[in-house]
Amino acid sequence: MQRRSIPGSSGRRRTVRHFGDPVLHTPCAEVTDFGPSLAELVEDMFATMYAARGVGLAANQIGVALRVFVFDCPDDLDRRHLGHVVNPRLVLTDGPEIGGPEGCLSLPGLEAVTARWDEAVVEGVRVDGSPVRVAGDGFFARCLQHECDHLDGLVYADRLGPLRHRRLRRAARHTPWAGTDRGRGRPAPD
């Protein structure tokens, strides 16, 4: 019996970009090269996500402006969802919009109540180009929407109302990571 490798076990941990870095606020390009470098990127993304104790990670969060995300996320029934999507498209959102606490590896230590649809479906391909369809509800649906937002150049703060957005930006300025990326991670002033 052949054992499958654990995602990220051969990857290297990369630096997570912080809120305010331009790469997080620019829509990502479609992947066109499905060679070994894409598989290496996905492995590095898993390694980085696990090291940071996240449940999802988009490629632009490590400075690569390509439409790729990885996930290892439970749903509301604590079922584990593990995988990756290349060139994802959010094809369906449904159910009620639910406000819930949301955090992000690019805004470590911060969270805000953010409204998300309770059901989501994402379609795309795997690193080998084969089609993939991922459906989720509850917390996992939140994760899918969050990662798709990243690839469109959005962070959850962009979904907040003006007052909550201002509060989050103010809190971000007082974090240990603010301005640690030689200017890349510094949030813009209100």
Image (tube, rainbow, N blue to C red):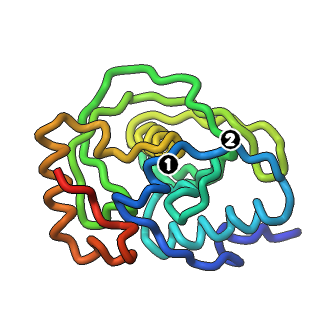
Q: In front here: 139 or 178?
A: 178
- Is 114 placed left or right of 29 in the picture? left
Residue 7 image offset from top left, x and y in percent: 67, 67
Tell me where residue 77 sits by quadrant: top left
Q: Which residue corresponds to the image point at 36% horizontal and 67% vertical from the top-left?
A: 185
- Is 164 placed left or right of 45 in the picture? left
Q: In front here: 150 or 80?
A: 150
Residue 102 image offset from top left, x and y in percent: 30, 49
Residue 107 image offset from top left, x and y in percent: 32, 61
Callout 2, which amino acid?
Asn
| Element marked by disc 2 | strand
Residue 168 image offset from top left, x and y in percent: 18, 53
Q: Is residue 22 visible?
A: yes
Label 2 vs 1, first from the N-terminus: 1
Q: Which residue corresponds to the image point at 30% horizontal and 36% vertical from the top-left?
A: 159
Q: In front here: 98 or 187?
A: 187
Is 89 situated above or below 113?
above
Label 1 belongs to which residue? 79
- Looking at the figure, which quarter contains the N terminus? bottom right
Is 94 situated above or below 115?
above
Callout 1, which amino acid?
Arg
Q: Which residue corresponds to the image point at 21% horizontal and 43% vertical from the top-left?
A: 113
- The image's mark for residue 87 is 2
| Element marked by disc 1 | loop
Tag in front: 2 or 1: 2
Q: Count neighbours of disc 1 (C-alpha within 10 A) and say few if under 14, some if 14 to 19, many if 20 or more.
A: few
- Is 183 placed left or right of 30 in the picture? left
Q: Count neighbours of disc 2 (C-alpha within 10 A) and say few if under 14, some if 14 to 19, many if 20 or more.
A: many
Q: Which residue corresponds to the image point at 47% horizontal and 44% vertical from the top-left?
A: 153
Q: How many marks?
A: 2
Distance from Cα at disc 2 to Cα at disc 1 = 25 Å
